[in-house]
Amino acid sequence: MTNSWTDIKNTDLVVVMGGNAAEAHPCGFKWVTEAKAHRGAKLIVVDPRFTRTASVSDYYAPIRPGSDIVFLMALINWMIQNDKVQWEYVKAFTNAPFIVKEGFGWNDGLFTGYDPEKRDYDRSSWDYVLGEDGYAEVDPTLEHPRCVWNLLKEHVSRYTPELVEQVCGTPKDRFLKVAEMIGECSAPDKTMTSMYALGWTQHSKGSQNIRGMAMLQLILGNIGVRGGGMNALRGHSNIQGLTDIGLMSNLIPGYLNIPTEKEPDWQTYMSSRSFKPLRPGQTSYWQNYPKFMVSFMKAMWGDAATAENDWAYHYLPKLDVPTYDILRMFELMDAGKVNIYFCQGFNPLLAFPNRGKLTSALSKLKLLVVMDPLATETAHFWENHGEHNDVDTASIQTEVLELPSSCFAEDDGALVNSGRWLQWHWAAATPPGQAKHDTWIMAQIFLRVKKLYEDEGGVFPDPILNLTWDYADPDEPSPEELAKELNGRALEDVRDTADPAKVLTARGKQLLNFSQYRDDGTTMGACWIYAGCWNEEGNNMARRDNNDPDETGAYPNWAFAWPLNRRILYNRASADVQGRPWDPSRKLLEWDGQKWTGYDVPDIAPASRPEEVGPFIMNPEGVSRLFTRGMMRDGPFPTHMEPFESPIANVFNPEMRGNPVARVFASDAEQFATSDEFPFVATSYRLTEHFHYWTKHNRINAALQPEFFVEISRELAAEKGIQPGASVRVWSKRGEVRAKALVTGRLKPMQCGDKLVHVIGIPLHWGFMGAARKGWGPNSLTPFVGDANVETPEFKAFLVNIEPATGEAVS
Amino acid sequence: MSRRVFSARGDHIESRRPVTVSRYRGITRLNHWVTAASLIVLLVSGLALFHPSLYFLTGLFGGGQVTRWLHPFVGVLLFFSFLLLFLQMWRLNLPRPEDRTWVSQIGDVVRGEEEKLPELGKYNAGQKFVFWAMSVLIVVLIVSGVMIWQEYFPDLVTIPVRRWAVLVHALAAIAIILTFILHVYAAIWTRGTLRAMTRGTVTGGWAWRHHRKWLRELAGRGESGPAK
Amino acid sequence: MTTDANLDSPRTAVSNPPVQPMQANLGPGDVVRASAMPDLPPPTRELTPVAKLIDVSKCIGCKACQSACAEWNDTSPEIEHNVGLYENPHDLTPDMFTLMRFSEYENPQTGDFEWLIRKDGCMHCADPGCLKACPAPGAIVQYSNGIVDFIHENCIGCGYCVTGCPFNIPRVSKTDHKSYKCTLCSDRVAVGQGPACAKACPTQAIVFGTKEDMLAHAEARVEDLKSRGYDNAGIYDPEGVGGTHVFYVLHHADQPSLYSNLPEEPRISPVVQGWKGVTKTLGLAAIGAAAVGSVLHGLLARANKVSAEDEVHAEKLVEGSESPTTPEKGVV
Amino acid sequence: MNIDLSRRGFLKLAGAGVAATSLGAMGFGGAEAAEQARVRAFKLASMTETRNTCPYCSVACGIIIYSNGDLKAGEEARVVHIEGDADHPTNRGTLCPKGAALKDFVNAETRLTTPRIRRPGSATFEEISWEEALDKIARALKDDRDANMVLTNDDGVTVNRWTSTGFLAASATTNETAWLTYKTVRAMGIVGFDNQARV
């Protein structure tokens, strides 16, 4: 989220598209009802289903799963056609005036540079024209035919209300009403917020869905302002934190990157990262990359990381592929190339696509280690549960260790919410039986491996032997010690760069914030964006002052928000070019002639003059991007792509299947179906009564939603002879499930051109463990393909068939 | 021998001097008293739940929960017990022409001037009234009672029907209590009656006075000893 | 941890529950009506009426109220089957005091689809049918703040409350044979807390406070709904049961039955009124009169006795000196 | 540790616009001892309060755990009730149906209480000691790493990556657990590293 949950109360219009906030985030959705009740805000829901969010909306429009880009680009087109643009914002705060290279273009659904063999684009033409001074050329009048604005205008001109009706199945009048309501928010004193979640991410072009809305929000001037923003409602309590800390194949804490093979040394690695400004006077904050990186290396390896050995750069693995993400790992596992796999509080057997493949892959492991508070399906994947997990137990040679871990009620520590708040919590209970804290388990594993290397030697033991482990109790590092490492500490006195005589933080003390990070090895800090969370003022994550001056919704003294306790990202953009708030009644920051003041920590150097320094300081341009250059694999603008399994051919290019650059493994490609055999569109989702696969272990939640079901329209039920509450069989090319049929008027067939599209809704909360009735997850059916940029699986649009179930057994 | 018209099987002259007449067999008496006891339990427990001022009566059964549990079971017992009585008695309780006369001369009945009344078989019209009233009310009570029997039949009928059932049950219960009072009072007021249900016999004079046709039929059969 | 008794937080319906021992503040002195106790002593004081307002238009049907209710009351609703509906459990049960009911409605005026979700549960009627019907003294009480509570120690499990309730709320347990329903969290209210459901409700579709405050809030909500085109928005606080201490804001107040058959004009059924009113009085009177009448008749009137003469006649008859056949005319 | 609570309540019930209907207004001001408590005994009396955060979605609602026993005092503690924290700016004491039933998660029948192992081909789990389980893991890791660590690629570039062992991190563990996990996994050179954010 660029903004916070509590900030939503400041909005005038909430657009819930690609999510179902009322259902998945009820207590966050509270702030929508607040905005409605107190500001008279309106709520629009665009969703294939009439959801619980839709039930309290002011306006609802249906949409075919996987067609969001058409809807979003058509909205942008409508805004441009109807002059619903926040012109001052667009001109000053976006890259609309930037001139793009001649080679760039779009044809037949593809951008220039496509190589079907490699399934990849040559992105060299997707860039600005650079002047001799190294700066990008711009045309502030937006008249240059190659400026981003004119290219965008042309790009979206294809997306008409008629196309929306044809591709999305949204009636034209519904689309136009939505466009009108959104268009009002182009006024500087009106804001709209976008609340989205996995309804947009779980597509093979998920990143582009989000880009689409982000562009719309920029055009309306809604980024950086109170009540605006792009608000990704993250699904789990700490996936924000785990991502911040970089628990992903290619990440280093604070959104730094694990190097690739093409970066064999430190200099090469650094050269492509500390971006130079693309416009004069801009901040380009990533110029500080070396400080963050060196401090991280010092946090990892302490004295073993020195300037002489390039901060132990060789200790870091170098990637040969973009990521070893989950999908790739299971692909490798299924090919017999993975021997040991750990699942820490994670239940992949139900969480990833194509369960048949997952079971097959897990069966090829030598050792599976599951650490979890609960008995998960993954830990029991080898156990035969009849139709619900029909495996040949004896033939599975995987050894499985199931380790009992503690849960939230039993440990201290911080979780990071969707609004980037780091909130500390305290243990209230004793773990049951022999259950242990995850920190203890991880420490034990590490210390034992280290001991083996000490005793026996082995392959490249250095990064293990030299890992910093200076904890009071090495067997169980305390949360306090770990949190302090995340914040960072002075290894030598940290001095003011302007006045070296002045010691800012003395040796051994906690760093104040990341402005004190150094690239000379005198500071250590694991996660620069968290710096400030536990400085010499104490544990700021545990702050509990709920004062909110002028009730802006900022709560600046409640816990700690990264970065620098900033509550709204890009908040400099809440004021115009001169630094006056766009909407004085919703002031966030203003330029007082000397510095930025207001309710939030400025997202800009406090003394940066407004006319000189752009608000988007992380970008070398200093402004936001309507055109993303070569930063996304599938295009600098979003272009319509059908799901890999779709009942309709791509309207721009009937030959194109799915996302043309998404990674597809050969065996998975064979399992993509067509609508001849599988005529119905399925989409998967959460229900409010459950949290993923956890709450089915809880008696009360199991009672509130006891059994697996699928939702179908009355029309489809009539067509297939399905009675409400009867059992149905749903199958895809990859597997099948049996479920109860919930026949409802909340799903209606959609007329897309000459095709009537039926949507089947498949909620995801059942498995074969726990208190609820045994069932299946949608992942028995879903295709094994992810988003082209981040590999999030396509769970939201795929093809199935359905029929009344004959008998109970499913083979 | 000739067909019994006014008497039941087992009715016979028990002794001749003085004359005693066997009116109810042991099994019938037992049946009657089971029925009577059930009815008393039912009316006490029912009244306890009917009116707050009588709720204390639940104490007799060990509290409200037990009373609530017991009442319907005793109701079922009563129903079947009475059913047996019914099967034994219904024939002699069918109306006869002399009943009309008896009813029309009810004043003579109350005054005890029985010599003015026609000769009767085993039951007079008043007794028959009690019999049929009991029969009808017990059916009404068991049917409405099952409808409101929360423990086993909570969903047998809809709540509106249940509301009617509970009203009908109450009204029928009042009626059956009134009938019961009539029955008991008549048995006491008409001296010499009670022994029919205790010892099983009545005196010849009692039979002569109240149920002469019955006595005549038994006498005409010449049965003077114990039944063979 | 603060466990200070002098909490500076306003002790509102939405503050955190206390952990310091506190005296429950709802007692016999606050009871204004009790089942089968016509001669209840008058209450020692008068509490301000409270109410729970359920704003159906803000409700997202998330069932947090159900969850919080079961958790707070330590009930354990059964894990049933899905029968093609969102309602789970499928009905109120002795272990589920409140239930979200879902109805789908195609609005003929706007052409829009609407999903109307209503939290069902005890309405805490000012004139409670359950209390009227209950035969067990003190099993159902009404406090002066309006809460109608079942006192389970006194409950006998007869189910008359089910018969009496105009909203079909009480459920009698198969296990302990006691009747259960929403208590409005009387145990929480007794220490100055709002009900668990109101505390949990994410969108504050459920709010709790004095009835006066709640009515004012409800009226503001109705205004908001009217401004959004719900011309028939209104408050459901039915007069037929004297008003309720749980009441609704409805977008279609003109058609309460749209909301899973919310009664249009609820009142205690006349049949129940008849049963608990005139029948009870007249019935007992008739029984009393009959009993007294018999006794008086027995005392005052001559008993019907068998004479010695009758015995002689009988003997003669048995001896055969009198004709065994009935004479034509039965007069001797 | 700044565990002290700000007992500042939100005077205005968030948005409901219901100005605090206070205890006093409801007649609960001067609580007199009732002669005979008729309502259910208040079950939180004398419990220990602990501030925590709901572990489900990322709204991160503030919760208060009421437990029987005080961990800080070195006692065993058992959760008896969990309720929304009314002082928390985001959820203001409210909870969704999952959060409101958190106690059932902590006390679920399917909570794991002892390390278990499933041997190859076996149809059951059997209990195993922590010592044995951890040693087994360490041994397996060392052996697999030594056998499969890729030190250089085909071009002779040092790559030091280990792809035959993978690690899936959680989605609800603390930052501190995450950091310790990160250190361990990265130091060994594991690249098959991912977390729930992927889906």
Image (tube, coloured by chain):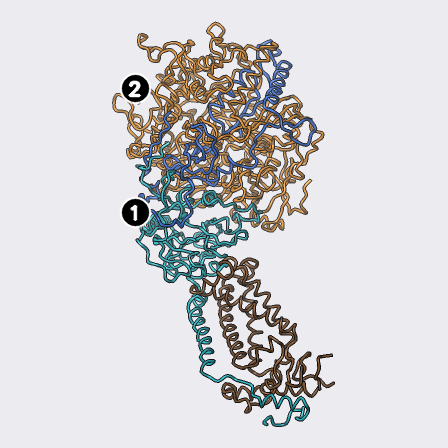
User: Looking at the picture, does residue A693 appear above or below residue C252?
Assistant: above
- Say what secondary structure mark 2 lies in: loop
Q: Nearer the viewer, residue C175 or C308?
A: C308
Residue A55 appears anywhere in the view: yes
What hue represents chain C? cyan
| Location of residue A542 (image quadrant) | top left
Q: Position of residue B169 (x, y in %)?
A: 51, 68
Point out the image quarter for the N terminus of chain A: top left
Residue of label 1:
D25
Viewer-nearest of labels 1 and 2?
1
Chain under label 1?
A: D
Q: Is residue B165 left or right of residue C218?
A: right
Residue drawn at 39 percent across, 61 percent down: C240
Q: Position of residue D5 (x, y in %)?
A: 35, 31
* Local crowd size for mark 2, using a 10 Å CA cut-off: few (<14), some (14–19), many (≥20): some
Question: For the residue marked with disc 2, what is the amino acid?
Answer: Ala
Chain under label 2?
A: A
Q: Is residue A66 left or right of residue D70?
A: right
**Which chain is displayed in brown in the rendered image?**
B
How many angstroms separate mark 1 from mark 2 (CA)?
51 Å
Question: For the residue marked with disc 1, what is the amino acid?
Answer: Ala
Task: Single out the residue that lies furthest toward the left.
Answer: A593
Residue A213 appears anywhere in the view: no
| Location of residue A30 (image quadrant) | top left
Q: Nearer the viewer, residue C170 or A636?
A: C170
Q: Nearer the viewer, residue A320 or A598?
A: A598
Q: Position of residue B164 (x, y in %)?
A: 50, 66
**Which chain is displayed in orange in the rendered image?**
A
Q: Is residue C326 left or right of residue B165?
A: right
Residue of label 2:
A607
What hue represents chain D? blue
Q: Which mark is residue A543?
A: none
